[in-house]
Amino acid sequence: MTMTGAQQGGLDPAKIDAVLALFQAAGHHPVTPAILQPADVFLDLTGEDIRRRLFLTNGTDGIDLCLRPDFTIPVCRHHLADPAASLPAAYSYHGPVFRQRADGLGEIPQIGAESLGRTDIPEADADLLALSVNALDAFGLSDISIRIGDETLFAAVLAGLDLPNVWRRRLRDLFGETDKLTKALERMSGGNGSEDDNRDVRLGFLSALEGADPEAAHAVVEDLLSIAGISAVGGRTPSEIAERFLEQAALANGASGHTRAAETLSTYLALSADGSGAAAALKTFAKDYGLGLDAPLSAFERRLEALTQKGIDPSKIRFSADFGRRLDYYSGFVFEIHSKAADAAGPLVGGGRYDKLVTLLGSSEDVPAIGFSMWLDRIAGAQKD
């Protein structure tokens, strides 16, 4: 299929072909998932940032549809729909994704690769990150910096703290959104930080729900939504919305008594080190705060070793403890690559591990998975600078 100029992102088509050939040489089979996708999948499995930027429409059968806002979910759906597909499997793609944005038409040219089903996790992580670095090199961009994060480590820190489950869930949901997470930690330590400018407006309602019988509270919220003629909001059912209100009630009225946990998390989230010093910094933190992080730290070190074996210079890697990607399906190791020389509008590459996604989409078995996407328009801009 011949790509338009917009789909090429302003890049030399020969370089795009060279990168696609690089992906195929690494075993990634090219696929072209449908542009129209079922909207409910993305409403359920992506973050708020993507949900509010969807291009939505309806089929003649009344089914809600959207223009694909990313490739990862469509590639996984393609894999599950193929009766001949087996694991491990590796795919590559090239084409536009569609997200509403203030400047421009919202058609964003991307190229990328996905790997499903590999159980050699550190090596798979290293292979995909190295493949994206090699792809940038093929585009003529070698002066780069690599940022990595790991939600698994953050979850392990949370698990080691004396916190109510509602707070653990809330903080994990906010991981990757640093401003909101910081405000939540301020509230945990007894401050007045608020994640939501409209919180005070709802406080009376939340206070009324706090301590109420869960079944009765669910019924109240569902009745209110029914009276308003609302059957779903952002893909959430009335029952899910009721559960969300109950959590907000607990968070609004139960923020005291967690100062030590807030201090521990703030210290962890401030950690930042290059690839040669990150493991040592994490070990020192774990020792200072008496946290058992041996298992995730061992996995972290094995990944760094695999990256070094792939020729990735540790000095080009920066671990940031607060770094997470704003898509709900990412579940562990994440990365993004920036140009050092260019003032790009954002990362040139973004990717990470999404070990739960294929199961959530209908797989009968757990499927470890990792992938990345490259923004062709940003890469073109970096080449010009």
Image (cartoon, helix red, strand yellow):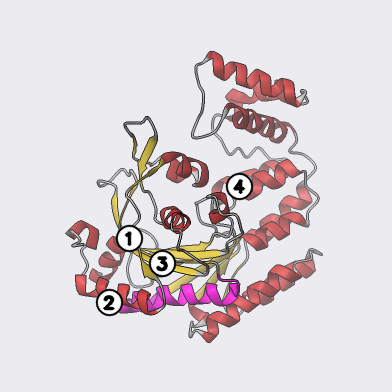
Q: Measuring from the top left, give residue 69's x and y in whole percent.
A: 38, 49
Q: Measuring from the top left, give residue 121's x and y in whole percent.
A: 59, 72
Residue type at mark 4 is Asp
The residue identified by callout 4 is: 173
Q: Earlier in the sequence, mark 2 or mark 4?
A: 2
When asked about the image quadrant of residue 366, the answer is: bottom right
326 relative to 379, above or below: above
CB-based contact (under 8 Å), mark 1 and mark 3:
no
Q: Nearer the viewer, mark 4 or mark 3?
A: 3
User: What label sits on residue 178 in the rendered view?
Assistant: none
The residue identified by callout 1 is: 110
Residue type at mark 2 is Ala
CA gap between label 2 and label 4 equals: 39 Å
- Closer to the camera, 297 or 345? 297
CA gap between label 4 and label 3 equals: 29 Å
Q: Is residue 162 left or right of residue 308?
A: right
Residue 139 is inside the magenta segment? yes
Q: Earlier in the sequence, mark 4 or mark 3?
A: 3
CA gap between label 1 and label 4 equals: 27 Å
The residue identified by callout 3 is: 91
- Residue located 63% across and 78% down the image: 302
